[in-house]
Amino acid sequence: MREFIVEADGGSRGNPGPAGYGSVVIDATTGETLAEAAEYIGIATNNVAEYRGLLAGLRTAHALDPTAHIHVRMDSKLVVEQMSGRWKIKHPDMKPLAAEAGGVYPATQVTYEWIPRAQNKHADRLANEAMDAGKRGEQWSATESTADLRSTGSAEAFQGRAQLSSEGSAEAFQGRGSAQLSGAGPGDALKGRGELRDQPPPAATVTTAKAIADTRAARNVATPSAGWAPADMGAPATFVLLRHGETPLTPQKRFSGSGGTNPSLSPVGQDQATRAATALAARGTIQHIIASPLTRTRETAAAVADRLGLDVTIEEGLRETDFGAWEGLTFGEVRDRYPDDLTTWLADPTAQPTGGGESFADTATRIAATRDKLTAAYAGRTVLLVTHVTPIKTFVQLALGAPPESLFRMELSAASISAVAYYADGNASVRLFNDTSHLR
């Protein structure tokens, strides 16, 4: 039986916003790129675009060989875990797409693996090409990607890419246990899968031009490890992540998100903001300041901006998670009042707090979109992002390629500082200071 690797990705510029997907089918034995698919899909969310990319990749592989074994590699933790059956699928837009994807091949012929974004560059590039084409009022075509090849060398030097790229980081996520990743997968929704199996590939353009695909992929091979970049990468976009100073809720360890009372800084928090400003001024590296729209971050950012002589830009994507009915409560109070909801929330990153708050998966999608927008806008610059606990932890989690449960294993003090540098090849380097001793 032949084995194909399907790498897929999707993106949305706005989430929801103009969206597209890309997917590539690779011969697992030879590393040969067999086919590409990409399509601009109009206004959609990141998750919908990612599922559409998966579906296109599976259908393209099926058109090549319906008996092949398929190993899917994606940097969407949500899609991989849901399609593997470890996370529940709750969103109404995801369920039919998951059902369609599950119906292309029998479940026994498909395996799924999460990979870091830097290892999914081929599909990511195709998705962006599709979105660029959509911006021009066009659909993606195979000739779109040939312009990048004019200055490239031969692809032969990169033979074996598939063998290297198949070494994902799934091992790092072993042993997490069914209690943490509980819930039925899409299996029950996949009845009638045989009806889908003979459908042709979607209306995306497919090419088997090996030289074009492999040479372009070779240009995008990731650097040896995160944080190491060759000189021609240029300066990274560096985000200095500053958590706001204390509010009256902070020392009481109460849930304080974007859906609560929007508290101001306490006197202690105001002093922390002033001291943070002094420390950042001494470093002398901040070129721009961007803040969450909430009062406590605006006040912290204003203190820094006053000291540095910079303006503050407000970015909605940096707001804290909405904790629904848990806003203002302690963890113990939530456990007493909503024990089942809390248990589910701790086990499933797609679960929302009681009362329709924001899930960690939703927060991650929002932060990833904000990250992409800001890295494009501030390439080579050092930017202070004044934000909250969950967004900062999510920036770090995404940069490290860590699982969602890692959010519960980080401690972030008020007015603490961390930093993530993003290089042109998609790699990231994380620096964790988290030291507020200079603020006291």
Image: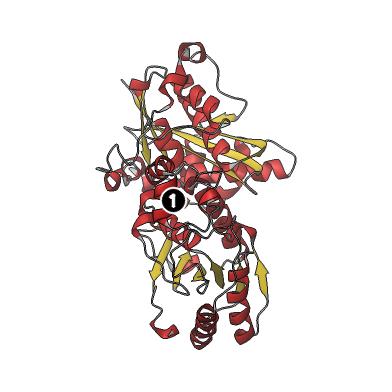
Among all residues in the image, which is located at the extreme right? 137
The coloring applied to the image is: secondary structure
Residue 403 percent across, percent down from the top left: 37, 49
Viewer-closest of 359 and 175: 359
Residue 104 percent across, percent down from the top left: 46, 20
Seen at 59% across and 24% down, the residue is 202
Residue 235 visible in the displayed image: no
Seen at 38% across and 60% down, the residue is 226
Badge count: 1
Provide the residue designation for mark 1: 334
Q: Is residue 126 above or below residue 398?
A: above
> Circle 1 — which element?
helix
Q: Quadrant of residue 18?
A: top right
Viewer-closest of 61 and 248: 248
Seen at 42% across and 85% down, the residue is 440
Q: Is residue 85 above or below residue 174?
A: above
Name the amino acid, label 1.
Val
Viewer-closest of 251 and 185: 251
Question: What is the quadrant of the N terminus in the image?
Answer: top left
Residue 424 percent across, percent down from the top left: 51, 61
Q: Quadrant of residue 142?
A: top right
Residue 70 percent across, percent down from the top left: 37, 27
Q: Is residue 163 above or below residue 326?
A: above
Q: Quadrant of residue 430?
A: bottom left
Residue 53 visible in the displayed image: yes
